Image (spheres, rainbow, N blue to C red):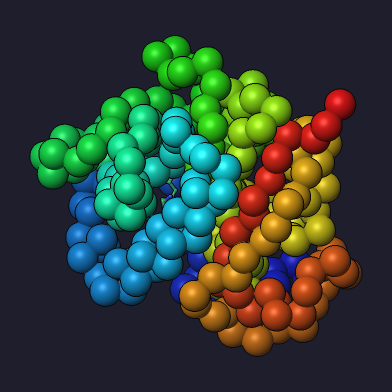
Amino acid sequence: MAIFRVKHNNFEQTFTSEKIDTLETNEWEDASRLDEQGWGNRYDYEAQLIREVITENKVKTILEIGSGPGVLSQKIQQLLPEPVTYHLVDKPFAKKYFDEHKFEGKFFVKDISMDMDPEGLLPKYDLIIINDTLEHLIAPSNVVKRMRDLMGPESTLFVSVPNWRMAHQFLYRGLWDYDNFIYFMYIHGFEMESVYPSCLQTPDYPKTDTEESMPDELRRSWNWYFVMKRKKQ
Ligand SMILES: C[S@@+](CC[C@H](N)C(=O)[O-])C[C@H]1O[C@@H](n2cnc3c(N)ncnc32)[C@H](O)[C@@H]1O
C-alpha cells in the first residue's frame, strides 16, 4: 500500500496537522455549499434512513453531534408524526445559521476536537447521530466514550464515516477503513447492528486487507452508515 492511496487536489502538499478543519472556528461562516442540489439529495436520503431507525426504536430524544447548521435535523423532524426532543452540537457559525433560519431544536456550541463537555445535555438520549464527523477530530476516542456515556442499554447510535475511495483528507488514515472502524467502535463498547450504503458512489479501487468483512456492494459506497448499540456487558 502506497503512502498516499488516492492523489487529488494536491492535498498532500497543503493538508497538515497544523491546519486541520476541526480547529477552524469560522467553519460554516460560508454555508453556500448547502445550496447545492447534491447536498439536499444526500440529506433527504439520510433523513429517510434515520426516520426508519427512529420508528423501529421508538426514539423520543435525539442528539446530533457535528450537525453542521442543522439542515438534516429539520428534514428528519419533518418526517416524524410526533415531535421529538432534538439537540445539536457544532461550531458558532453553524448555530448562527440555525438561529437565523429559526430551525426546530436546541443547539449547543461546543468544541469537540479533543473531547465533548456534556454540560447542558440530557443524561441519556434514545438516539445519537454523528454523521461524517468523527474522522475530523483530533481525539475521536474521547468523543466516542462520551457518546457511550450518553446512551442507555436500549439507545441507538447512527454513525457514518467516509469511504477512503472518496479521497477524504484523513488525520488518521486507516482508522476509518471498514474493519478497523468496526474494531475501534467495538473496543469502545459498541456492536454493529446494521450498515447501509450511501446514495453516492466513489471511484473504483479494489478492496484492501482492512476491508475483509465489508460486503462487496459497499465497496464503492461514498460513506457507510452504521447502526450500533452498546455492547451487552
Ligand atoms: C464533514 S462535516 C459533517 C456535517 C454534517 N454532519 C453532514 O454530514 O453534512 C463535520 C462537522 O463536524 C463539525 N466539527 C468539526 N470539528 C468540530 C469541533 N472541533 N467542534 C464542533 N464541531 C466540529 C463541523 O463544523 C462540521 O459541521
Q: Residue at x 34, y 71 (%)?
A: 41
Give percent across and percent down for residue 192.
75, 50
Return the residue nearer the eye: 12 or 71.
71
Residue lying furthest bottom: 204
Place of residue 52 in the rendered image (x, y in percent of width and height, measured from the top left): 51, 56
Compared with 223, 58 (above or below) is: above
Q: In which quarter of the image is residue 157?
A: top right
- Ligand 1 positioned in quadrant: top left
179 relative to 75 in the view: left or right: right
Query: Which residue is nearer to you in this view: 82 or 4?
Result: 82
Residue 154 as seen in the image, left or right of residue 187: left
Residue 130 visible? The answer is no
Front-most of residues 136 and 198: 198
The count of marks equals: 0
What residue is shown at x 86% (from left), y 26% (from top)?
A: 233
Q: Pick the quarter of the image with the N terminus.
A: bottom right
Residue 214 visible here = yes
Q: Position of residue 40 (x, y in %)?
A: 30, 67
Q: Which of 85 and 189 is in front in this view?
A: 85
Residue 155 in which image quadrant: top right
Q: In this view, does 228 lie to the left or right of 197?
A: right
What residue appears at the point 70 percent right and 57 percent down from the top-left corner?
194
106 lies above or below 203: above
Residue at 13 percent across and 44 percent down: it is 101
**Whether residue 231 is situated above or below residue 197 in the rendered picture:** above
Name the image quarter holding residue 91: top left
